[in-house]
Amino acid sequence: MINKFTQELKRGVITENPIFVSALGLCPTLAVSTSVENGIGMGIAVTLVLICSNAIISLFKSIIPDKVRIPVYIVVIATFVSVIQLLIKAYFPELDAHLGIFIPLIVVNCIIFARAESFAAKNAVLPSITDGLVMGIGYTIALVVLSAIRELLGANKLLGLEVIPGYSPMTIFILAPGGFFTIAVVLAMINSYKQRSIK
């Protein structure tokens, strides 16, 4: 059981990582990865929506007509996004202020649609929940990595704390161009490592 979960976790974090391998959901990733707090918050929100929507779609997949499956997926995902958004507004108002419109936009996040269509609609409930969890963990780790690089270089902070005394931050890294540059460099490094591993 533990070995199987470890293999699933490796799939979500390494071999099928939503951001670093599949390159899904890059727009919200670039927008919210300006600080580690934002990355963790968005990652947890997406993970919860993935788990819940995968479970419901898998549970009712046999009675969802094929012609209306996409609208049904939207309704299911939007329901859980609304619940998560209300919880964030109630208990984490600062996070809500930082993430803003990107929480409601989880409804149309490619990662969640991809998992619903390619996995939850074809598998049993427990594997679908596991898939949602490991893909969410992979997404969160990728967000935190990108956020840490951008926050460190662009603000000389991690989780709001100064890291290198006397370092003059390069503000461009917390702006849009810095996001594009960071993700391009990280993806290039990952692809270079993969190429060397194959050889």
Image (cartoon, rainbow, N blue to C red):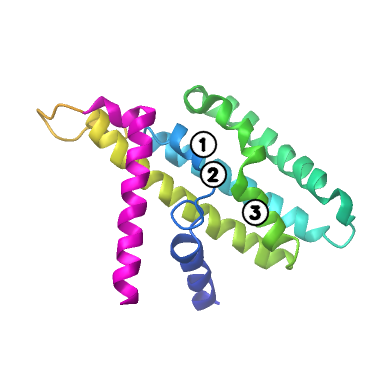
CB atoms at circles 1 and 3 under 8 Å apart? no
User: Which residue is pictured at 88% across the width and 52% down the height?
Assistant: 67
Label number found at residue 168 = none
- 134 lies above or below 79: below
Q: Which mark is residue 114?
A: 3
Determine which residue is flagged by label 2: 25
- Amino acid type of the residue that numbered disc 1 sits on in the rendered structure: Pro
In the image, what residue type sits under mark 2?
Gly
Q: Left or right: where does residue 44 sit relative to residue 174?
A: right
Residue 160 in view of the camera: no
Q: Residue furthest left?
A: 166
Q: Is residue 5 above or below residue 132?
A: below
SS at circle 1: helix
Q: Nearer the viewer, residue 91 or 50?
A: 50
Q: Nearer the viewer, residue 21 or 149?
A: 21
For marks 2 and 1, give the CA distance: 6 Å
**Is 55 on the left or on the right of 47, as rendered?**
right
Q: Is residue 145 above or below residue 175?
A: below
Tell me where residue 11 appears, x and y as whole percent.
Answer: 50, 67
Magenta-colored segment: predominant secondary structure: helix
Quarter of the figure with the C terminus: bottom left
Tag count: 3
Q: Position of residue 30 (x, y in %)?
A: 44, 36
Q: Which residue is tagged 1?
A: 28
Residue stretch rendered in magenta on the structure:
170-199
